[in-house]
Image (cartoon, rainbow, N blue to C red):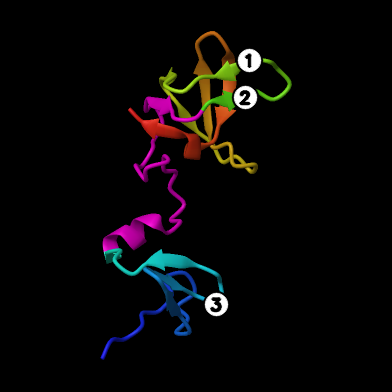
């Protein structure tokens, strides 16, 4: 007899299995049936800023852009593989939580979901 887990987001007991996922109908959170408790703890939002792969970022780190980013209001783009040194973490209300200076482009803000820690 198997027991269904509680939702890691809202602690609801009303979860159901759909293929290899657990789904909570109350908060719409989905997670893998095979995920370990450690992976779930990392994926929860603890206020820390993490890169696209879940690595913790801090001021002064170097990151690499993993997606081509178009700059709003300009014809310039930040290409995949661009290395950005000495980042500063900010509390961006619009999701742009990295402040940096990119060679050839200048000062700009990035979203942490589009970078990986170098």
Count neighbours of disc 2 (C-alpha within 10 A) and say few if under 14, some if 14 to 19, many if 20 or more.
Answer: few
Find numbered disc 1 in the image and state the secondary structure of the residue it sits on: loop
Answer whether labels 1 and 2 touch (C-beta < 8 Å).
Answer: yes
What is the residue that sits farthest to the front in this orientation? 19
Judge from the rendering whether residue 49 lies leftward or rightward of residue 117; answer left or right: right
Name the residue carrying label 2.
70
- Which residue is painted at 55% across and 70% down in the image? 28
The disc, 1 or 3, on the residue closer to the chain's N-terminal end is 3
Query: Residue drawn 41% across and 19% down?
Result: 83
Badge 1 is on which residue? 76
Is 61 in the magenta?
yes
Q: Where is residue 74 in the image (x, y as percent from the top left)?
A: 70, 17
Q: Name the residue under label 3.
A: 25
Q: Which residue lies furthest to the top in this view?
A: 104
Which range is magenta? 38-67
Q: Distance between the residues labelled 1 and 3?
A: 43 Å
Where disc 3 sits, the SS reads loop
Judging depth in this view, the residue of 58 and 21 nearest the camera is 21
**Among the 4 quarters of the image, the one containing residue 49:** top left
Please tell me how crowded label 3 is: few (under 14), some (14-19), or many (20+) other residues with Cα within 10 Å. some
Identity of the residue furthest to the bottom in this view: 1
Q: How crowded is mark 1: few (under 14 residues within 10 Å), some or many (20 or more)?
A: few
C-alpha distance separating marks 3 and 2: 36 Å
> Residue 39, image x and y in percent?
31, 58
**Magenta stretch encompasses residue 50:** yes
Vertical position of residue 6 compared to residue 76: above or below: below
Q: Do the residues labelled 1 and 3 touch (CB within 8 Å)?
A: no
State the residue at coordinates (37%, 28%).
Answer: 61
Examine the residues drawn in magenta and state their main secondary structure.
Answer: loop
If you read the primary sequence from the N terminus, does the residue marked by circle 1 or circle 2 appear first?
A: 2
Looking at the figure, which quarter contains the C terminus? top left
């Amino acid at each position: 007899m198997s027991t269904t887990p509680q939702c890691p987001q809202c602690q609801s007991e009303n979860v159901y299995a759909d293929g290899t996922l657990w789904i909570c109908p109350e908060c719409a959170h989905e997670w893998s049936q095979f995920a370990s408790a450690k992976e779930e703890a990392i994926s929860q939002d603890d206020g820390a800023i993490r890169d696209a792969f879940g690595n913790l970022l801090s001021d002064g780190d170097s990151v690499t852009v993993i997606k081509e980013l178009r700059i709003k209001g300009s014809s310039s783009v930040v290409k995949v593989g661009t290395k950005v040194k000495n980042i500063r973490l900010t509390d961006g209300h619009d999701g742009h939580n990295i402040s940096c200076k990119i060679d050839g482009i200048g000062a700009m803000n990035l979203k942490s979901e589009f970078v990986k820690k170098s």
